Amino acid sequence: MAMIQTRPVNVERWSVTSAESFETILARMEQEIGRPEMNAFWQKAASAGTLPELEGVVNDSIGPTGLMEFVRFDLG
């Protein structure tokens, strides 16, 4: 029998108000977020033998802001 556990997770939401277009702001944001090819990322992560090696895989994949996109859903 599976045991289901719940736990609270803190989330921070932020908003941007600008005279520039949504597309311009989005393009700037996207330049700052790392987007690794996920199949290669998971293969490298799985083959990391130590924590420093895994940290290296992650650090090679993040963008200038320290963020990485794992998946994107287009809700239309």
Image: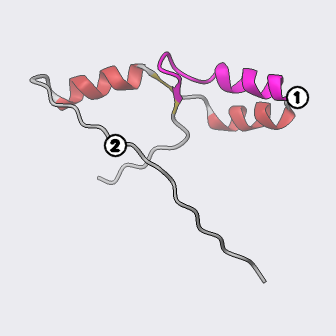
Check disc 1 and report its element: helix, strand or loop: loop
Q: Residue furthest left?
A: 19
Q: Residue furthest top?
A: 64
Q: Position of residue 27 (x, y in %)?
A: 31, 24
**Amino acid type at mark 1:** Thr
Residue 11 drawn above or below residue 29: below
Q: Nearer the viewer, residue 22 or 17?
A: 17
Q: CA distance from mark 2 to mark 1?
A: 34 Å
Residue highlighted by disc 1? 50
Check disc 2 and report its element: helix, strand or loop: loop
Which residue corresponds to the image point at 42% horizontal and 49% vertical from the top-left? 73
Residue 24 drawn above or below residue 22: above
Which residue corresponds to the image point at 78% horizontal and 28% vertical from the top-left? 54
Q: Nearer the viewer, residue 6 or 70?
A: 6
Residue highlighted by disc 2? 13
Residue 23 drawn above or below residue 63: below
**Residue numbers of the magenta segment:** 50-67
Which residue corresponds to the image point at 62% horizontal and 24% vertical from the top-left? 61
